[in-house]
Amino acid sequence: MGAATLIFAVMYLNHSVEQTLGKGRFTRDLLSGFFAVLMSSLLRLLLTILILFVTVFELDAQDQPYVHHTERVQDSGKAESVKSMQDFLRDGQFFGHSRYFFMATDNADGLTDYFANAVGFGIGYETGKFKGFQLGISGYAIYHLGSSDLSNVDALSNQPNRYELGLFDVEDPKNLRELDRLEDLYVKYSGSKYQMKIGKQHIKTPFINPQDGRMRPTLVRGVLANYRISPKWMVQVGGIDQISPRSTVHWHRVSESLGLYGVGVNPDGTKSLYKGNVVDSYVGFWGLEGGSESVKWKFWDQVVPGVFNTTLVQFDGTRALNGRKHVNVQSNSSELKGLKQVEANQTGNSSRPGMLLDYGVQWITQQSMGYGGNEDQSKSYFGEKNRSFVFGMRAGVSQPKRWKLGVNYTRITAHGRYLMPREWGRDPFFTFMLRERNEGYGDVHAFTLVYSKQVQRLPGLSVDFSYGRFYLPDVKNYAMNKYGFPAYQQGNVDVRYRFSGFLNGLDLQFLLVVKNALGSTYDLPKYEINKVNLTHFNLILNYHF
């Protein structure tokens, strides 16, 4: 009864706020746009959290530390004690997530500026184990708290909004109400060395990953399995037939998911027509990861039959600079950029951590399969003759749990465009920076410098500074530049704070992004708006339980 009352309160407040703020205009003074909705946003977020708590308590969930189901290594289900359906359900775990997101983009003079506020909440459940089997389900709902008109097309450039719309539904810019999605719905089997999951689920691979920089991540439907062939090596395999990309609320067949974020141009400069015209297919992949305590290898191959194939080989290493013997490189280190790729645990007699040298090398190759998606090359996603080669390297030093400093380099050769659907995940490159991609380009040189600091006097506070220079082909070199993006430089400031104690599970993030053009835009606004010569703001509040 308590949950129902709170739900009706949020629905009423949602209607009131949208009537008041739904048609507000974004001004140069970002603070005015932000504070206009801050109080109502915080109130609705509080109500959302209360709904989650009341719901969980009414369902008699266990009181336990939050561990998101997609990050568990070993589940806590009591496989041997489950003797009935009641035990199967009672031994499960509830998990939840609520997020508030404020985003704004200040474009160059004369071009449209945007802002948006959103709040969302979700809850999920995973049963206990019965002979190794478990069931899982989750869902999420997003509420529009106020924004500029995200369906508006800029008058000078004739370009739509790029960033803020991603908080809602990129398929329908006017959809600000029907923003709920069934996310997880799976059957999982776990053995001593292997695990298999069938159904709708989260995923994290080099090329298909959450890219969780908006309200909700990318999800897939398929079969994913892993097998630990030794204590230090694991093989993963999977097949995917449906994808629900970030910033959407629907599930799509693999071929239908291509082009939801925009299609760019063909190598001859004409508009790409592959959206809705790619041969029906699926995604298959296998990966092998492992190594020693100081060296990690990753081998990955992904195939979309009739469209394209991608192969990755990556090496990551760490060694102590002060002669300490024990350095442990985390198995998922290659998922993070630069020096964030290594979280090393080092032991010794000194209470002060020693210095570590961190380095890595990456090689990616791509080739077409069949006609690249369609015999008519104007409707082909990859292109019958396209192929690409990517080389990356990184190096740096760090003092674990204190600071990290690293330099990174990526080279996409001029053999062809590197292509990977942006709807599926973010780039695996060492030089990746939040709020931009290098997918869709060839003949690229990218350099980044990253410094990360964990503030010792205020545990839970971390600050990342990153700067990059990205030398892309000229915007009119259509064969190498799919999206008409000029060479640019980018600076990010990322400040995060994780609360503890009574507020454990709550974290706050502020991200500032500045991008400026290095290459020519030919004084054409379409090569500038939402791309370069802009300042981009993000404020995110998360609560996990």
Image (cartoon, rainbow, N blue to C red):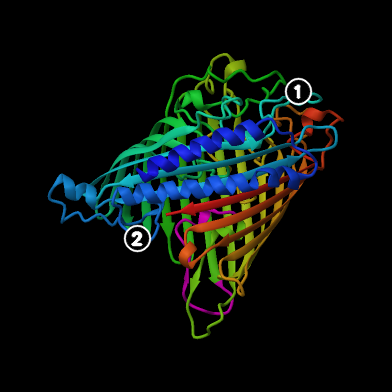
Picture residue at 81% right of the left edge, 29% below the top: 525
The one nearer the camera, 153 or 19, is: 19
Q: Amino acid at mark 1?
A: Asn
The picture places residue 140, in percent across and down from the top left corner, at 44, 39
Residue lying farthest bottom? 349
Check if residue 333 falls in the magenta segment. Answer: yes
The picture places residue 52, in percent across and down from the top left corner, at 41, 48
| Residue beneath disc 1 | 158
Q: Nearer the viewer, mark 1 or mark 2?
A: 2
Residue 171, picture quadrant:
top right
If you read the primary sequence from the N terminus, does the residue marked by circle 1 or circle 2 appear first? 2
Q: CA distance from mark 1 to mark 2?
A: 51 Å
Name the quadrant of the N terminus.
top left
Q: Magenta segment, which residues?
A: 320-337
Q: Is residue 469 left or right of residue 427?
A: right
The picture places residue 346, in percent across and down from the top left corner, at 49, 74
The mark found on residue 17 in the picture is: none
- Decide if residue 521 is in sight here: yes
Picture residue at 52% right of the left edge, 21% below the top: 373
Q: Amino acid at mark 2?
A: Gln
Is disc 2 placed on a helix, strand or loop?
loop
Residue lying farthest left? 83
| Residue beneath disc 2 | 64
Is disc 1 placed on a helix, strand or loop?
loop
Check if residue 264 falls in the magenta segment. Answer: no
> Is 379 drawn above or below residue 439 in the view shown?
above
Residue lying farthest right? 523
Crowding at label 1, few (<14), some or many (≥20) Cα neighbours within 10 Å? few
The picture places residue 434, in percent across and down from the top left corner, at 64, 47
Secondary structure predominantly adopted by residues drawn in magenta: loop
